[in-house]
Amino acid sequence: MKIRILYILFVLLVSCSKERVIPDVRQCNLELSLTVPYQYTNDIQSFEGVVVYVKNSRKDYVFTAMSNAEGKVVFSNIEPGFYVVNIGSEIVGVNDIFVLNGNKSIELFSSLTVNVDLEVNVIQVEGAGFVIKEFYYSGCLTPAGNNYTDDQFIEIYNNSADTLYADSLLIVEHESYGYEPNYWSYMASDSIVVKMIWAFPQSVGLLPVAPGAGIIIARDAFDHKSDPNGNPLSSVDLANAGFEFWSDKNVDSDIDYRSPNMVAKLWTFKGNDVSFHTRGGSAMAIVKIPGNVDEFVSQNLVVKEGAISANQYFCKIPNKWVIDAVEVTWNDKLYKRFHNSLDAGSVFVEAGSLSGFSIRRKVRRIINGRVVYEDTNNSNYDFEHDVVPTPGIYLQ
Amino acid sequence: MTKKPLLIFAILLLPLFFYSQNINGRLINKFDKQPVAFAVLFVEETGEWTTSNTDGSFEFKNIQIQSFTIIVKHLGFQDMYYNIELGDTDNKYVEIYAEPNSYNVGEVMVISQKGLQMSTSEVIGQSAIEYVQPNTIGDVMQLLPGNIIDNPNLIRKQPVSIRESGTDINSWAGTAVIIDGAPVSNDANMQVFSTIGISTDFNSINKKIAGTAGEGVDMRQISANNIESVEVIKGIPSVEYGNLTSGAVVIKTKTGYTPFEIKLKTDPNIKNIYAGKGHLFNNGSSINVGADYTRSFEDIRSKYKGFDRITAMLSYAHVFFKNTTPLSVNTGVSLYSVLDSKNTDPDEHIANEYIYNKELGLSYNIQSKLLLNKPMITGIRSNASLSLNKQEYFAKEYRSSGVEKISLSFTEGENEGIYLPAESITELKVKGLPVNVFANIIANKHIDINTKIFNNILFGAEYKLSGNYGEGQLFDVANPPYISLTSSRPRSFKEIPPVSYLSLLFEDKYVQTIGQTKLMLQAGVRFNNFQPIGLLKTELGFYTEPRFNAQYIILNSDNLFINNIALRVGLGLTYKSPAAMYLYPNVAYTDLVSLDYYTGYQNTSLAYFTTVTHETKNNALKPAKNLKREAGVDFNIGSMSASVTGFYESLTDGFGMLNEYRFEHFKVYNATGVPQGEKPNVSNLLYTDSVYIIDYSYPVNNKQTEKYGVEYSFDFGRINKLQTRVIMSGAWLRSERVNSTMNYNYLPVKSGGGSFTEVGVYPAGEKKVEERLNTTFRFVTHSTRLRLILTTTMQVIWYDKFCFEYYNESPLYLYSNTSNYMPFTTEMQNDSYYKDYIVKRGSRYYDIEIKPPLFLFNIKLSKEIYDRLKLSFYANNFINYRPVYRSERALTYERRNPEVYFGAELLIKL
């Protein structure tokens, strides 16, 4: 009898075991609520179909979801961490296409409801104005394994259906390299600050650009690929580039090739030649400054307070004069230079510096043999990256 | 009548004839009571010397002063100082006990000691040198008060600086390094790519070559294994030492008997093996031989970048005519070979690259000392040496700078150049062959006025020549390794005249005993002829260096509590002649571009230049000058001995480089309109007359440093219960360095388009002030029973501060092509065009940066195992204290203190 009781007790003891609760890591909910500025609430009735990307910055995976009509989107049971929300979508309205852009960084430690303010850009179906079609900054290697960056270039393109005049366009580079917070972020909503302003030379006159045509501005307008003095590992032939950047800093350094030279209106860090940052530090834009550019530059210089190095002067340009901008970043950092209204996203060559790849706009559509490139002011979406440079080639 | 002066003269000299003593004695080993043979004994005051016989006996004849010190120096033994006070007895017999260097006898000196010279100096004896476990003599400098301990490193060049808190080029070049009486010279070192384009910091060029041209002696080339003692003269040196500014490091190599020793030393990056022996013959002559090999890597994970060194020496010493006029001759040959190399990392993409820096040095040296004791001359000593260094820098590297255009011309005028491909493998060789010849002869006469006053007069002459007979810079002009605005052309060093000087020396040492006190004065003058032409004419100038040292020993008695106080004062002037790199710099070639027409085809492209040349030699170059003043006190209280010295040194006319700007006129041709497929012909082209501003660097005397400081050293004596001696030493040092004492020219870069057409002249006087106070506490525990010595060192840097003094950043005036001088007004400071001329500093640039106190703990242990083995070990920063310091001024972080480092050494005596 005793033994049986013991047996029963034993069975009970064994069978009753407390379930250990293992805390579930994936247990936060993130709810996003999308809003647009006041003036667009009538035009945009429904947020249905707006794609929202939520990317975990540390672990590099992305959740995608679509918003409902009220602009609410919920991500359930995701793990705590640091996230970046990115939205880039179009809503076809009555008369216009509304491009919605937004991004936000979120620190998620427990369930959260976040409001994401969206920028709205109204664009026409047809492209408008000049865009930066391609930017090749990463450079490549030489046969011996050394750096070769002489083949960098930037290409602008007439995305509209009319002939436009490029003579007053200015190519500028933002002052911030993007590996630390933008010193000028306090004014980013209405101005950009640049360290380099290049203008087309007076000698070319009005410089008309036909629809579907573009202008290549090369660092060295030289056939890098095939010239015996060049680099056989480079993929570009820029001998017929429209213009080139040329420095007169040291008399015998930069070779002045046949192409006409751009004129430097501001070049804070004047060197032997223009050199773009190969890892993605050069954020480029096209601007148009009305009136006398030299006068404007001299009256709009700003100073960055450095710690011990000498102060340098940079130029401040209002956002309203920016025609196109591309936020080129480093692959693992995002310290934005341009306000979301100019470029809500970012793009970079994932293969890294010296890979020989460039970034290029995606073709939106081809109308009558003429290419119209994507221009939603969100380079996350608009640009292809890690492509072999194709200067001067528009129809893929 | 004529006899009267003779009589007076004889009367004055009478005391000399009456008072004359012979001192006999025996030198005995304290430990085993055996006689010590062939040791050198000398009288400090008179310079008389003798050696002990095989039975240990020695004799000094005709000593005419009453109180003096006998100094015994012998390899393998501690230095002995024996004071003698003579009464009126005719002869005196002394027995001196010498202590051998082994750990089971008495106390072995493993720290630096105050030197005996009148000038402030520190002596580091053999035991102390070995205890540090040094790889080079430079490592031994950490024992000096005020110097900071650092980890051994053979990858960077090793400077030596006296009374400095960092490395200053002029201070390094101004430290004379003397081995066995002959100076090691770096004056003829020309291993640079070019002296042009160096601007004000010539290290940027030297970094490519890893050379020390224009700098001081690289201490890595001197192994510490063969060294018997090092004396570092920090104060005003005797006139025997010249061509220096900061001081001298006097090295004496081993002579005498040593057992056959093998030493193996290792630490994380450096391995070293040494073997040496000193053999003593029956007649007292000795032969010493030693050789060592050192291998070091920058990072043991990547064994392709390293430093190798081999040194070897052979010397012979003998005393001839010992009983009549002893003549001591010491002669030797030494050799060193250094290889600094960097192969291509096999894991890198860039294959085929190879860089090395090789140096092979061979020197022959003969030192002799003769004791005559004649009426006109007491003794003569002389040194002569000849050394050759074969230096070779070789770099096979890719030049991958994109397509370039260069001129090949060696003369001025218009010429056609070539276009270079984007990448090509190049070779650069810089082959130098500096040859140094040195000889000096110094005679001394000892004169005693009476038993309490005596004089030692010294007079002599010295000559040194340093020339470079190497092939120089060798590279293919059509495939140069680097391209710069002022490209250099290859230059042979054989065309460079040698650097030489001829000096005459006079010095008198006067010693007077006044009751219990003693007054010693040493005054001398050194007349220098730098770059002599014959004997009486000079190219660089005649320079006179007066030197004065005085010491007054107020008290010197063993009876009182305070048993020794001595006051010291010194004042002196020294000069250092410029090195060959400054006296004979490269010619500056500038190739201005007259036409840059690149078509992609060689037969139609044209790179056309206008070459201009400029001599950069500065005929107004002077030697650097240093005025040293110092005062100090030494005292003993009970068992504590202390020494405090304050000094103030002003170095003026230090060597540096400045930029010279020139407005060059040349033609710029216009090739528009030349049809395709045709090469342009300049005689048919239109041109415009253009002006371009070029610059090149030239040597000047524009550096200045004012140094103030107090050095202190307290030896608290030995705590017998702990068998530990406590020593506290350190220094407070403040230096004010002026970057340029001359106004300098500078053309700023215009941030807008185009360039400026006026050159700015900026004021001199930009100054950096540094200050540091540090103390090193050493606890030396010596157990004779265990035969070990353990040293625990705590180094405290109480504060370390520097700042730049406020400096007016605007130019004084601007000058243009037409030689108009335009003063820079206050309106121009705000003008948008002229604003770029102001060298603007950030808001924090003038902030004072003070680093907080820092502690460093090191430990050293050395143990003798029986009589034949000694094992040593050291660990630096063994608690791994490396605090992070945030500089508010520069917004950077820095880790202070050297990394944890350790090493071990095994010494085997056979």
Image (cartoon, rainbow, N blue to C red):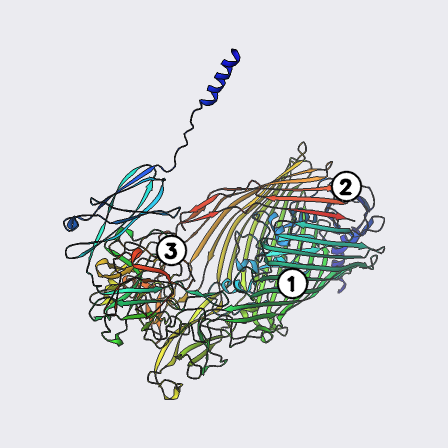
Which chain does the numbered disc 1 sit on?
Answer: B
Circle 3/circle 1 CB separation < 8 Å: no
Residue located beneath label 2 in the image:
B866
- Mark pair 2, 3: CA separation: 65 Å
Please, what secondary structure does the residue beneath circle 3 have?
loop
Work out whether residue B541 or residue B269 is closer to the camera in this orientation and state it: B269
Residue located beneath label 3 in the image:
A330
Residue B785 visible, this orientation: yes
Q: Dot 1: within a 10 Å radius of its alpha carbon, few (fewer than 14), some, or many (20 or more) residues?
A: many
**Which quarter of the image is occupied by the C terminus of chain A?**
bottom left
Q: Dot 3: within a 10 Å radius of its alpha carbon, few (fewer than 14), some, or many (20 or more) residues?
A: many
Same chain, marks 3 and 1?
no
- Where is residue B812? Give x, y as percent: 35, 64
Work out whether residue A324 or residue B799 is closer to the camera in this orientation and state it: A324
Q: Residue furthest bottom?
A: B684
Q: Is residue B595 left or right of residue B800?
A: left
Q: Which disc, if any, is residue B328?
A: none
Same chain, marks 2 and 3?
no
- Mark pair 3, 1: CA separation: 68 Å
Work out whether residue B505 or residue B735 is closer to the camera in this orientation and state it: B735
Disc 1 marks which amino acid? Leu
